[in-house]
Amino acid sequence: MVHLMDCYAYTSRWRHRHPAEKAAFAGGLLLLSFFIPLAGLLLILLTVSLVALLGARIPSLLYGRVMTIPMAFILIGASSLLVTLSYPSNHLHIGFAEAGILPAIHLVARAMAAASCLIFFSLTTPTADWMPLLRKFYVPAVVVDLMLMTYRLLFVFAERLSTLQHAQAARLGNLTFRSRIRTTGLIGANLFIRSLDRARRIELGMESRCYNGEIPCLPFERKPSLPVIFGALILCLVIAGFGFLTKRWPYA
């Protein structure tokens, strides 16, 4: 899924828009999702989805598929608010907590609103574009370099894991439950050893290229559009105003 999102980010309709423009939109709404009331959260989710589907022209099937991944974890976590445990007469009793319905709704709405902002930014902005943007905001170079190396190694290890899984399947390593356990252990051990070897080779390669503590990144060719950034910020203010105006509504 990460590889699919990265591939689409490079072919997105908004691929050549300056990352600061998309960061102003997605980042502003992401910050709002931390404290805005419920009605504002639903408006954030609707706005981001409309911009992603109609503005950036992200395929609805892809967008829905990516959104279901965080939704599954969020629903599992929110379901714990709807369960009560008690020990009457030394017996475990599991019940339904009506008081947890509203907090669970707020939790799901807040988490999904924040996830939609991150997914929108991920599907429209490749890593090579937003890494230089972090340095513009004075993020330490070592942090940016660690993020870049981790992101790169994710694809290397995913490809290696797929190769090992296919090799073990070709050797009939998944026929029984016992063989699957053994195969999983062998793959994990092999991947761990090769990860250490790969990291060491990368370190030697960077030292041989006179690594001075900062990996050079090419700046974005185009300059950000100030009207677009101001428009994104105004939209955030409008959504924030709507959210706090509806704060006194029931269940808000």
Image (cartoon, helix red, strand yellow):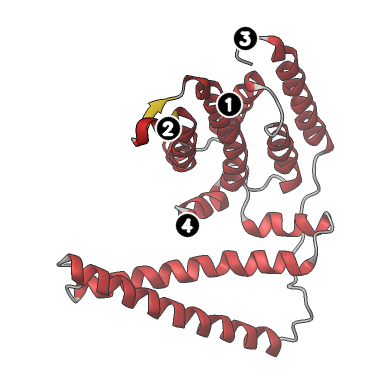
Instruction: Identify which residue is drawn at 57% across, 86% down.
Output: 201
Mark 4 residue crowding within 10 angstroms, few (<14) / some (14–19) / many (20+): few
- Report the residue that reaches farthest toward the front: 89
Mark 3 neighbour class, 10 Å CA radius: few under 14, some 14 to 19, many 20 or more: few
107, 133: nearer the viewer: 107
Disc 4 vs disc 2: Cβ atoms closer than 8 Å? no
Q: Position of residue 97 (x, y in %)?
A: 46, 24
Query: Which residue occupies the foreground of this view, 28 or 56?
Result: 28
Mark 4: amino acid: His
Q: Which residue is mark 1?
A: 106
**Could you say whether the residue bearing mark 2 is in a helix, strand or loop?**
strand
Of pointers 1 and 4, the one earlier in the residue sequence: 4
Mark 4 vs mark 2, foreground winner is 2
Q: Position of residue 1 (x, y in %)?
A: 44, 52
Q: Which residue is mark 2?
A: 86
Report the residue marked by disc 3: 250
In front: label 2 or label 1? 2
User: For mark 4, what is the residue?
Assistant: 3
**Residue at (57, 31) in percent of width and height:** 107
Q: CA distance from mark 3 to mark 1?
A: 13 Å
Q: Secondary structure at mark 1?
A: helix
